[in-house]
Image: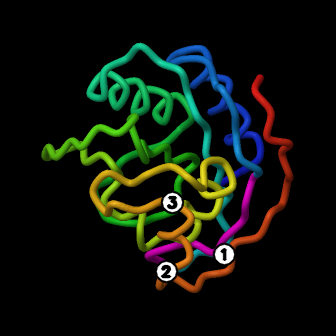
Amino acid sequence: MGDRFFYVERAGRLIDREIGAIVRSSSIYESEPWGFEDDQNFLNKVVEVDSDLQPTELLTKIHKIESELGRIRTGAGYEARTIDIDILFYGNWIIIQNDLVIPHKHLPGRRFALTPLAELVPELYHPVLACKVQSILDRCKDKGEVKVVHATRLAAH
């Protein structure tokens, strides 16, 4: 919702300050809302972060950043929001808890997340699916359009 580019940029600055240094980032992609109807398309970006936080601490910081950027969690399912930050991977860890599943359990079915991830790290190995990210994207059944709206040169910051 709102100024989508502002929220993506501001989230990046808060991640860099609160969680750890952003090592590199994907381009920004635009896609239709996933899981519900809305008039405004979504922006998606993947960042690689160098952090000393443990996964549960990381999730707590993410929720703090989302709240700071105006996200309100209603528990009503998929809906428009100012920002949504997910942990897709945490190294090669596998975590299954009530409030945290890593690698992200819905990633294989979401082209809007796989596309920027594959741009950034196509050879990243998924420890549960036992294959590389690019292979997951190639087999993704989600046919939603995902297009680059702001290209990023992939270089370390």
Secondary structure of the residue carrying numbered label 1: loop
Residue in the foreground of this view, choosing between 94 and 109 = 94
Give how far across and how far down residue 128 sits, in percent: 27, 57
Secondary structure of the residue carrying numbered label 3: helix
Pick the quarter of the image with the N terminus. Answer: bottom right
* Residue at figure coordinates x 16%, y 46% from the top left: 96
Q: In whole angstroms, how far apart are the C-alphas of marks 3 and 2?
A: 10 Å
Q: Are marks 1 and 2 in contact (CB under 8 Å)?
A: no
Find disc 1 in the rendering and name its residue.
39
Magenta-drawn segment:
28-36
Q: In whole angstroms, how far apart are the C-alphas of marks 1 and 2?
A: 28 Å
Q: In whole angstroms, how far apart are the C-alphas of marks 3 and 1?
A: 30 Å
Residue in the foreground of this view, choosing between 134 and 77 = 134
Answer left or right for 64 relative to 26: left
Residue in the foreground of this view, choosing between 146 and 36 = 146
75, above or below 32, in the image:
above
Residue in the foreground of this view, choosing between 33 and 107 = 107
Find disc 3 in the rendering and name its residue.
133
Q: Earlier in the sequence, mark 3 or mark 1?
A: 1
Answer left or right for 22 relative to 76: right
Q: Amino acid at mark 2?
A: Arg
Between tags 1 and 2, which lies in front? 2
Find disc 2 in the rendering and name its residue.
139
